[in-house]
Amino acid sequence: MSLSELIAGVEDHEKSLTVFNTDTETVESVRDQFRDRNLSVRAERTESGRPGSFVVLSSEREGDEDEVVTATNVEDVLSAPAGTEPGLDDDVHHPILDHLDETMFTSYDTEQMVAASREMEDRAWRLGEGSVYAGFQRLSILSDQMDVYTRLAAQENLDVHAYAYPDASVPDHDTDLTIHVERTEEIAESWFVVYDGNGVDVNKCALLAEERDDRAFYGFWTYDPETVDWIVDYLESAYGRIEQ
């Protein structure tokens, strides 16, 4: 399995959230509520307009109709008691959130994925131990990020690897940063930041995305240790050429 196939597998497991009998503004509010979850939101209306507004979470079954997982009122999805953060400890969200993977988030939003990658870099910096694997697509992009990654590599107990396609010279540096120059389409199209948490499952995290159009990406970030371990194992076994 390749990085692209892993992304496709995540995308194939996308669930559907159908919002019935409500207005466009409410549908957009629901879509925004779950914008980083691995599901699509669509609007429909029952023939009679009854019952009132509600949402249905479903998953696709191959060669068959969607399987309904759960349903609840729109108001329950959108409302949250004062002083709580939606999706953390909010009982009214549980009918939907109980059936969503709390370790997997997906997005087409580049800014959102940049924020997720920065959080992972910051986690590695704060913990200061383990290994970081970062894919920049091209050496010219890596050059713009060298300040961040040479700073990470300066951490004595942090092993930092950068992967890029050679469209420019390898950036000069005097740190322990390991640069993997790879002439493959996969590296040229993939953006990733992976932190192995120094072997501690609760600290593991990864972002993986692919460029599907000019600077337009689809990807996911995850805190699932098995997924992080798979990406680390794949990178270590598939890519070994080093230029520093």
Image (cartoon, helix red, strand yellow):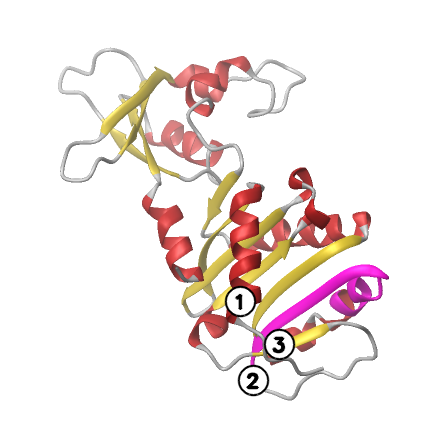
Magenta-drawn stretch contains 130: no
Q: Residue at x 50, y 40 (%)?
A: 104
**SS of the residue under disc 2:** loop
Query: Which mark lies nearer to you, 3 or 2?
Result: 3
**Where is residue 154, by image quadrant?**
bottom right
On the picture, is 172 further left or further right than 37?
Answer: right
Tag 3 near tag 2, CB within 8 Å: no
Q: Which residues are magenta?
A: 149-166
**Which x, y percent locates residue 164?**
57, 75
**Which x, y percent locates residue 99?**
41, 25
Q: Residues within 10 Å of mark 2 (few under 14, many from 20)?
A: some
Q: Residue at x 64, y 80 (%)?
A: 242
**SS of the residue under disc 1:** helix
**Which x, y percent locates residue 178?**
70, 73
Q: Residues within 10 Å of mark 1 (few under 14, many from 20)?
A: few
Query: Residue beneath label 2, please?
Result: 166
Q: Which mark is residue 237?
A: 1
Query: Residue beneath label 3, please?
Result: 180
Q: Is residue 11 above or below residue 35?
A: below
**SS of the residue under disc 3:** strand
Q: Tell me which numbered mark, 3 or 2, is placed earlier along the sequence.
A: 2
Q: Residue at x 50, y 42 (%)?
A: 105
66 or 23: which is nearer to us?
66
Q: CA distance from mark 1 to mark 2?
A: 20 Å
Disc 3 residue type (three-letter): His
